[in-house]
Amino acid sequence: EADIYQTPRYLVIGTGKKITLECSQTMGHDKMYWYQQDPGMELHLIHYSYGVNSTEKGDLSSESTVSRIRTEHFPLTLESARPSHTSQYLCASRNRAKSEAFFGQGTRLTVV
Amino acid sequence: GQQLNQSPQSMFIQEGEDVSMNCTSSSIFNTWLWYKQDPGEGPVLLIALYKAGELTSNGRLTAQFGITRKDSFLNISASIPSDVGIYFCAGQLLQGAQKLVFGQGTRLTINP
Protein backbone atom coordinates (compact mmCIF):
# COMPACT_ATOMS: atom_id res chain seq x y z
CA GLU A 1 0.00 0.00 0.00
CA ALA A 2 1.29 3.43 -0.98
CA ASP A 3 2.04 5.96 1.76
CA ILE A 4 1.47 9.19 -0.08
CA TYR A 5 -1.00 11.75 1.17
CA GLN A 6 -2.60 14.82 -0.29
CA THR A 7 -4.49 17.54 1.52
CA PRO A 8 -7.03 18.89 1.19
CA ARG A 9 -9.11 16.33 -0.74
CA TYR A 10 -11.54 19.05 -1.86
CA LEU A 11 -11.11 22.82 -2.01
CA VAL A 12 -13.52 25.49 -3.19
CA ILE A 13 -11.96 28.91 -3.26
CA GLY A 14 -12.58 32.36 -4.67
CA THR A 15 -10.75 33.93 -7.58
CA GLY A 16 -7.55 35.70 -6.64
CA LYS A 17 -6.84 33.68 -3.49
CA LYS A 18 -3.48 32.10 -2.85
CA ILE A 19 -3.58 28.34 -2.25
CA THR A 20 -1.13 25.59 -1.40
CA LEU A 21 -1.83 21.95 -2.09
CA GLU A 22 0.08 19.61 0.19
CA CYS A 23 1.70 16.31 -0.75
CA SER A 24 3.70 14.11 1.58
CA GLN A 25 5.14 10.63 1.23
CA THR A 26 6.71 8.42 3.88
CA MET A 27 8.43 6.00 1.50
CA GLY A 28 11.68 7.97 1.20
CA HIS A 29 11.20 8.34 -2.55
CA ASP A 30 13.53 10.73 -4.36
CA LYS A 31 11.27 11.52 -7.30
CA MET A 32 7.98 13.34 -6.91
CA TYR A 33 5.49 14.59 -9.49
CA TRP A 34 2.41 16.77 -9.84
CA TYR A 35 -0.18 15.96 -12.49
CA GLN A 36 -3.26 17.92 -13.51
CA GLN A 37 -6.29 15.95 -14.65
CA ASP A 38 -9.73 17.03 -15.75
CA PRO A 39 -12.45 14.48 -14.81
CA GLY A 40 -12.09 11.30 -16.82
CA MET A 41 -9.34 12.72 -18.98
CA GLU A 42 -5.63 12.04 -19.34
CA LEU A 43 -2.97 13.07 -16.84
CA HIS A 44 -0.76 16.04 -17.65
CA LEU A 45 2.60 16.44 -15.91
CA ILE A 46 3.00 19.98 -14.58
CA HIS A 47 5.97 19.69 -12.18
CA TYR A 48 8.54 17.14 -11.05
CA SER A 49 11.45 16.84 -8.67
CA TYR A 50 14.38 14.43 -8.54
CA GLY A 51 15.28 15.29 -4.96
CA VAL A 52 15.73 18.05 -2.42
CA ASN A 53 16.18 21.48 -4.03
CA SER A 54 15.42 20.01 -7.48
CA THR A 55 12.29 21.17 -9.33
CA GLU A 56 11.45 21.12 -13.02
CA LYS A 57 8.47 22.18 -15.10
CA GLY A 58 6.53 19.41 -16.77
CA ASP A 59 5.03 19.01 -20.20
CA LEU A 60 1.93 21.14 -19.53
CA SER A 61 2.52 24.79 -18.81
CA SER A 62 1.17 25.76 -15.41
CA GLU A 63 1.00 28.99 -13.42
CA SER A 64 1.63 27.02 -10.25
CA THR A 65 4.98 26.70 -8.49
CA VAL A 66 6.48 23.94 -6.38
CA SER A 67 9.23 23.55 -3.80
CA ARG A 68 11.20 20.59 -2.44
CA ILE A 69 12.87 21.53 0.79
CA ARG A 70 12.43 18.08 2.37
CA THR A 71 12.46 14.69 0.69
CA GLU A 72 9.01 13.78 1.93
CA HIS A 73 7.22 17.03 1.11
CA PHE A 74 6.35 18.51 -2.32
CA PRO A 75 3.79 21.32 -2.02
CA LEU A 76 2.21 23.10 -5.00
CA THR A 77 1.24 26.76 -4.78
CA LEU A 78 -1.03 28.97 -6.85
CA GLU A 79 -0.40 32.64 -6.05
CA SER A 80 -3.69 33.83 -7.53
CA ALA A 81 -6.32 31.21 -8.28
CA ARG A 82 -8.52 31.56 -11.37
CA PRO A 83 -11.51 29.55 -12.61
CA SER A 84 -9.26 28.06 -15.32
CA HIS A 85 -7.31 26.36 -12.52
CA THR A 86 -10.34 24.25 -11.63
CA SER A 87 -9.20 20.64 -11.97
CA GLN A 88 -7.98 17.61 -10.06
CA TYR A 89 -4.34 17.72 -8.96
CA LEU A 90 -2.55 14.41 -8.38
CA CYS A 91 0.76 13.93 -6.61
CA ALA A 92 2.95 10.88 -7.21
CA SER A 93 6.32 9.55 -6.07
CA ARG A 94 8.84 6.94 -7.24
CA ASN A 95 12.07 5.64 -5.82
CA ARG A 96 15.35 5.78 -7.68
CA ALA A 97 15.58 2.09 -8.42
CA LYS A 98 12.09 1.32 -9.66
CA SER A 99 9.83 2.95 -12.20
CA GLU A 100 6.62 2.27 -10.29
CA ALA A 101 4.88 5.51 -9.36
CA PHE A 102 2.43 5.69 -6.47
CA PHE A 103 -0.30 8.30 -6.43
CA GLY A 104 -2.06 10.19 -3.70
CA GLN A 105 -5.84 10.43 -3.65
CA GLY A 106 -5.80 13.82 -5.35
CA THR A 107 -7.10 17.28 -4.56
CA ARG A 108 -10.21 18.41 -6.39
CA LEU A 109 -9.87 22.20 -6.76
CA THR A 110 -12.77 24.44 -7.73
CA VAL A 111 -12.17 28.15 -8.22
CA VAL A 112 -15.32 30.27 -8.25
CA GLY B 1 3.40 15.98 -27.04
CA GLN B 2 1.44 12.75 -26.75
CA GLN B 3 3.68 9.72 -27.27
CA LEU B 4 1.35 6.89 -26.20
CA ASN B 5 -1.80 5.84 -28.01
CA GLN B 6 -4.21 3.89 -25.81
CA SER B 7 -7.20 2.10 -27.24
CA PRO B 8 -10.05 1.73 -27.09
CA GLN B 9 -11.06 5.01 -25.49
CA SER B 10 -14.15 3.39 -24.00
CA MET B 11 -15.69 -0.04 -23.68
CA PHE B 12 -19.22 -1.12 -22.85
CA ILE B 13 -19.41 -4.80 -21.97
CA GLN B 14 -21.59 -7.33 -20.18
CA GLU B 15 -20.59 -8.69 -16.82
CA GLY B 16 -18.56 -11.86 -17.25
CA GLU B 17 -17.01 -10.85 -20.56
CA ASP B 18 -13.27 -10.58 -21.10
CA VAL B 19 -11.67 -7.20 -21.78
CA SER B 20 -8.62 -6.27 -23.78
CA MET B 21 -6.94 -2.88 -24.15
CA ASN B 22 -3.56 -1.79 -25.43
CA CYS B 23 -1.04 0.98 -25.70
CA THR B 24 1.26 1.63 -28.63
CA SER B 25 3.98 4.11 -29.37
CA SER B 26 6.64 4.95 -31.91
CA SER B 27 9.12 5.27 -29.02
CA ILE B 28 10.90 2.53 -27.09
CA PHE B 29 10.08 2.02 -23.41
CA ASN B 30 11.99 0.16 -20.70
CA THR B 31 9.02 -0.08 -18.34
CA TRP B 32 5.27 -0.39 -18.76
CA LEU B 33 2.80 0.24 -15.96
CA TRP B 34 -0.96 -0.27 -15.84
CA TYR B 35 -3.18 1.74 -13.48
CA LYS B 36 -6.88 1.81 -12.59
CA GLN B 37 -8.58 5.00 -11.48
CA ASP B 38 -11.95 5.19 -9.74
CA PRO B 39 -13.93 8.45 -9.88
CA GLY B 40 -12.51 11.12 -7.58
CA GLU B 41 -9.50 8.98 -6.61
CA GLY B 42 -5.88 8.73 -7.64
CA PRO B 43 -4.68 5.98 -10.01
CA VAL B 44 -3.79 2.68 -8.35
CA LEU B 45 -0.98 0.54 -9.75
CA LEU B 46 -2.18 -2.83 -11.09
CA ILE B 47 0.79 -4.34 -12.89
CA ALA B 48 4.41 -3.37 -13.61
CA LEU B 49 6.40 -4.80 -16.53
CA TYR B 50 10.18 -4.47 -16.88
CA LYS B 51 11.33 -6.82 -19.65
CA ALA B 52 10.42 -7.13 -23.31
CA GLY B 53 8.13 -10.13 -23.75
CA GLU B 54 7.30 -10.28 -20.04
CA LEU B 55 3.82 -11.59 -19.25
CA THR B 56 2.54 -10.85 -15.75
CA SER B 57 -0.73 -11.68 -14.01
CA ASN B 58 -2.46 -10.15 -11.01
CA GLY B 59 -5.59 -12.17 -10.30
CA ARG B 60 -7.91 -11.82 -13.30
CA LEU B 61 -5.60 -9.24 -14.88
CA THR B 62 -2.83 -10.12 -17.32
CA ALA B 63 -0.45 -7.69 -18.99
CA GLN B 64 2.36 -8.09 -21.47
CA PHE B 65 5.38 -6.02 -22.42
CA GLY B 66 5.63 -6.10 -26.23
CA ILE B 67 8.69 -7.65 -27.84
CA THR B 68 9.43 -4.46 -29.77
CA ARG B 69 9.26 -2.47 -26.49
CA LYS B 70 6.81 -0.12 -28.20
CA ASP B 71 3.56 -1.61 -26.95
CA SER B 72 1.76 -3.31 -24.09
CA PHE B 73 -1.65 -4.83 -23.53
CA LEU B 74 -3.88 -5.48 -20.53
CA ASN B 75 -6.50 -8.21 -20.39
CA ILE B 76 -9.20 -8.61 -17.77
CA SER B 77 -10.94 -11.95 -17.66
CA ALA B 78 -14.51 -12.58 -16.45
CA SER B 79 -15.27 -8.95 -15.70
CA ILE B 80 -17.19 -8.01 -12.56
CA PRO B 81 -18.94 -4.74 -11.60
CA SER B 82 -16.00 -3.48 -9.51
CA ASP B 83 -13.81 -3.51 -12.64
CA VAL B 84 -15.60 -0.35 -13.76
CA GLY B 85 -13.26 2.61 -13.98
CA ILE B 86 -10.61 4.19 -16.16
CA TYR B 87 -7.49 2.22 -17.00
CA PHE B 88 -4.27 4.01 -17.87
CA CYS B 89 -1.07 2.68 -19.31
CA ALA B 90 2.18 4.46 -18.53
CA GLY B 91 5.64 3.97 -19.90
CA GLN B 92 9.15 4.96 -18.93
CA LEU B 93 11.04 6.01 -22.05
CA LEU B 94 14.33 4.24 -22.72
CA GLN B 95 15.91 7.56 -23.66
CA GLY B 96 15.41 10.94 -22.08
CA ALA B 97 14.26 12.31 -18.74
CA GLN B 98 13.01 10.01 -15.99
CA LYS B 99 9.36 10.81 -16.56
CA LEU B 100 6.41 8.53 -17.06
CA VAL B 101 4.34 9.03 -20.20
CA PHE B 102 0.63 8.25 -19.78
CA GLY B 103 -1.91 7.02 -22.28
CA GLN B 104 -5.27 8.75 -22.71
CA GLY B 105 -7.10 6.11 -20.69
CA THR B 106 -9.74 3.45 -21.42
CA ARG B 107 -13.09 3.95 -19.71
CA LEU B 108 -14.68 0.60 -18.86
CA THR B 109 -18.42 0.35 -18.30
CA ILE B 110 -20.05 -2.95 -17.34
CA ASN B 111 -23.71 -3.78 -17.81
CA PRO B 112 -24.92 -6.21 -15.14
Image (spheres, coloured by chain):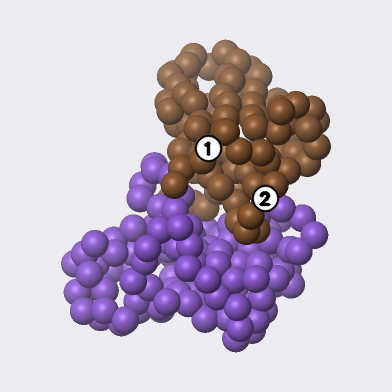
Chain colours: A purple, B brown
Residue for badge 2: B95
As drawn, A28 above or below B21: below
SS for callout 2? loop
- Foreground disc of the pair 1, 2: 2
As drawn, A18 above or below A8: below
As drawn, B74 above or below A51: above
Going 78% across and 41% down the picture, which residue do you hit?
B50
- Hey, which residue is sitting farthest bottom in the picture? A69
Residue B93 image offset from top left, x and y in percent = 65, 47
Residue B77 image offset from top left, x and y in percent = 65, 19
**Dot 1: within a 10 Å radius of its alpha carbon, few (fewer than 14), some, or many (20 or more) residues?**
many
Going 70% across and 33% down the picture, which residue do you hit?
B69
Residue B104 image offset from top left, x and y in percent = 46, 38
**Dot 2: within a 10 Å radius of its alpha carbon, few (fewer than 14), some, or many (20 or more) residues?**
few
In the image, B78 versus A70, the foreground residue is A70
Amino acid type, residue under disc 1 in the picture: Leu
Question: Which quadrant of the structure image shows residue B96?
Answer: bottom right
Which of the numbered marks, if any, corresponds to residue B4?
Answer: 1
